Structures are given as C-alpha cells and as structure tokens.
Amino acid sequence: MKTKNLVLMALLLGIGTILHAIIPGLISGMKNDMLLTMMFLGILLFPERKSVLVLGLATGVISAATTTFPGGQLANMIDKPVTAFAFFGLYLLVQRFGQSLVTVGILTAIGTMISGAIFLGAALVFTGLPGGAAFTGLFLTVVLPTAAVNTIAMVLIFPVVQSILKRTSFAF
C-alpha cells in the first residue's frame, strides 16, 4: 500500500469525520452518516482488500467515537468493516460496467442501506433496541433518507475527486 494512498484515505476520512461530528442526531440519536460516503469513495478510488480493511476499521473506530446513538459504539465497530467488504464485493461485481455516476450512485445507496441494516441489527442484539417495529421505523425514517443524501453527495463529489486526481500527478 502506497503512502500517498494512505494519505488520501486519511484525508477522506478526516472530511467524513468532520461531517459526521457536526451533523446533528435525528431520531433516537441516529444521524446521516457522511463518513460512510467518504469510506465508499475511498473504496472506489482504492479497490483492493488492504485498503478496504483499513478504511472499514478506521471508519468503524471514528464512527464509534462520534456516534450520538445510545450504545452505537459497538454497532459501528461491527457495521463499518462488514459494510466496507460488502460494498467492495458489490463493486467487484459491477466493475465491468465502469465507474459511471449511475453505478456509483446505486452502489452508494445499496451500501448505505446495508450499513443501516447491520447497524440497527447490531443495536437490536447488543443494546436492547426494541423489536422489529423500532428497526423498521428507524430504517424507514433514518436509513432510507440517509441513503438518498449519501447518494446525492456521492454523485456530486465523485466527479470532482476524479477530476482533481486526473489533473495531479497522483497515480493509482
């Protein structure tokens, strides 16, 4: 793994951390997870297992440190690495279609929904989140809107990052 790749991944996670920390908690302390968008962007830029592992673990730790969901620390530590590899797997399945904005947007939406389901499932098991009604309610009112926001953000950010990287001497 190249040092400049690590630096760019750290920069993306730093931006995501700031966004994650300043976005207020919505229902039951759950919030839009812009850190997740930055993790997905890092995976799209560096689609290799080592990078996915580093991004997933680092994102889990950072999300756990900045969560406002009661007991969300453990749920984030489980959710982010699993989601990172699920997103990576989906990316590998569709990479033959290229990195079009449509593909990236769809991957981001699906990845966010996977993340939300894993997070809520872990919260249900480990922190005593009330049964299926709470899961469904939080999924519909927080996860789905977050998927929409993350998808819009990715569709706006991804071409900008690609353009910047093409104009610099940054080589993958």
Image (spheres, rainbow, N blue to C red):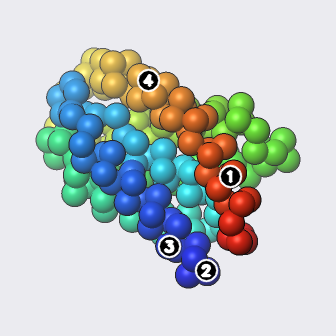
**Residue at 22% of width from left, 27% of height from top?**
26
Please state which of the two labelled residues, at mark 4 or mark 2, is closer to the viewer: 2
Please state which of the two labelled residues, at mark 2 or mark 3, is closer to the viewer: 3
Amino acid type, residue under disc 4 in the picture: Leu
* Vertical placement of residue 47 versus 163, above or below: below
Residue 21 shows in this picture: yes
Q: Earlier in the sequence, mark 1 or mark 4?
A: 4
Q: CA distance from mark 2 to mark 1?
A: 20 Å
Q: Earlier in the sequence, mark 4 or mark 2?
A: 2
- Contact between labelled residues 2 and 4, with CB atoms less than 8 Å apart: no
Q: Earlier in the sequence, mark 2 or mark 1?
A: 2
Q: Earlier in the sequence, mark 2 or mark 3?
A: 2
The x and y percentages for residue 10 are 44, 67
Q: Is residue 119 left or right of residue 2?
A: left
Q: Quadrant of the N terminus?
A: bottom right
Residue density around tag 2, few if under 14, some if 14–19, many if 20 or more, within 10 Å = few
**Residue at 73% of width from left, 52% of height from top?**
92
State the residue position of label 1: 162
Please state which of the two labelled residues, at mark 3 or mark 4, is closer to the viewer: 3
Q: CA distance from mark 3 to mark 1?
A: 16 Å
State the residue position of label 4: 144
Amino acid type, residue under disc 3 in the picture: Val
Q: CA distance from mark 1 to mark 4?
A: 27 Å
Q: Quadrant of residue 100?
A: top right
State the residue position of label 3: 7
Q: CA distance from mark 2 to mark 3?
A: 11 Å
Q: CA distance from mark 4 to mark 2?
A: 34 Å
